[in-house]
Amino acid sequence: MTRDKFIQTVSEALRLVGITPDNKLVLGLSGGADSVALLLALRQLNHTVVAAHCNFGLRGQESDRDQNFAERLCAQLDVPLEVTRFDVPAWQRTHGGSTEMACRQLRYEWFEHLRLTHGCQAIAIAHHADDQVETFMLNLLRGTGLDGLTGMRPMNNRHIVRPMLGLWRADIEQFLNEHGHTYVTDSTNASNDFTRNRLRNAVIPRLERDFPDARGRILDTMTHLSEAGNLIDYFISQTLRELTLPTSDATLRIDKTRLNLMPQPDYLLYEILKPYGFTRTQATQAVSASTGSRFDADKWQLWVAPAWMELFEANATDINEIHRIDLEHLESLPIRLEVIHSGEPFKPGMVDGRRSIALPLSLASANLILRHRRTADRIAPFGMRGTKLVSDLMTHLRLSPTQKRAAWLVEAGGTVVWVVGYRAARQTEVQPGSRDYIILRVKD
């Protein structure tokens, strides 16, 4: 591949993801052939680049050698360079995980910090076609779904752009030779102690010997799978409209009956829930789960009701959020309430016990608090005997988990007197004809 063709390939890849020469980029610069070639290409395309080098200190003097090389190269090309050192073992002691995972997490978090600090459009990473083939093989051998077999995307939603996915390692080395540029080599690349290295050094070369152009055919397959994945994503988005039930309080509510009429309902549910962190196993279990079952994934929860499944944020409500109710200044509350002093003799039809309640003046003068439900809260529901756990009352009213978490309670003198919007307590009873009361109502 000629030098001009190399530059053209990088330029076209950037154009296809909406990156123009006017866009400033952070470039991950290890000092190896791939990142050096990308730096040279971006410079020739007139991009403003901030190079970023991570020194993980895992290879002793060789790590420092790489940093020194990056510093000299950037000084030569007049490219600003940011350098950081990471204590990988210390990070692992806190977070766990493999060394490779720790380095990746630290690297990309720092790159994103630099992107925001320097006002850059994206983070350019020098992954290429050989990396794609290796990723395909790794995921295939580990067991994966469609996404795992489509490899790395030219640009993802974390502002990572990979403009060299259409270039092979041999193209990169030829480009650097034509430029007369040197680069550093990571000595661990020759070691087969790592799975990716074994694939690169032993498995894939053997495939190439026995099946000529195996890498090219694998790359073609990945392209076809990616196209199929895009089509599936489109149809899932269309199908989701048919499955979604109207709701004002849940993030997503899925019609169970319609879901089960679809082909492969467990796989369809998995594709819907996957962006929220749910696994294929959880999706399969949820399809046949009994009412009341709950599935957790990171910050999200899926709750199974008799006729639907409901997705909501697990920690969307702060149960410790407390507001003192000042009847003269209700505008500071998180919900819209109003006080009515009618002066008329009280009639039971003035309130509905759900969105409006009457409070005897003796109760209205108590310490009124607005808060969310706590585990041991009890209420003496108007029209019922005894007391009930507020949680049991909410279940009786068929409230979803989202509604339960979002509901507000009014507490008077330490007693729950109103589950706002749902049920008042007996303590709010006002005798017919009485003038010693106020009405508290939810404003529309």
Image (tube, rainbow, N blue to C red):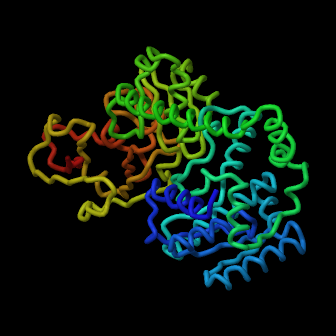
Query: In the visual, does 267 lie left or right of 215?
Result: left
Height in image: 237 above or below 153? above
Measured as percent of width and height from the top left, residue 124 is found at 58, 63
Height in image: 146 above or below 405? above
Query: In the visual, does 416 lie left or right of 5?
Result: left
Query: In the visual, does 260 lie left or right of 354?
Result: right
Please tell me in which quadrant of the rendered image residue 26 appears.
Answer: bottom right
Callout count: 0
Measured as percent of width and height from the top left, residue 260 is found at 47, 16
Q: Residue at x 75, y 40 (%)?
A: 138
Q: Which residue occupies the extreme left position in the image?
A: 344
Q: Residue at x 22, y 47 (%)?
A: 441
- Residue 146 seen anywhere in this rendered image of the structure: yes
Say which of 292 and 37 sits in front.
Answer: 37
- Residue 426 seen anywhere in this rendered image of the structure: no
Q: Residue at x 83, y 63 (%)?
A: 186
Measured as percent of width and height from the top left, residue 133 is found at 70, 43
Q: Residue at x 37, y 30 (%)?
A: 238
Say which of 415 and 167 sits in front.
Answer: 167
Say which of 424 and 167 sits in front.
Answer: 167
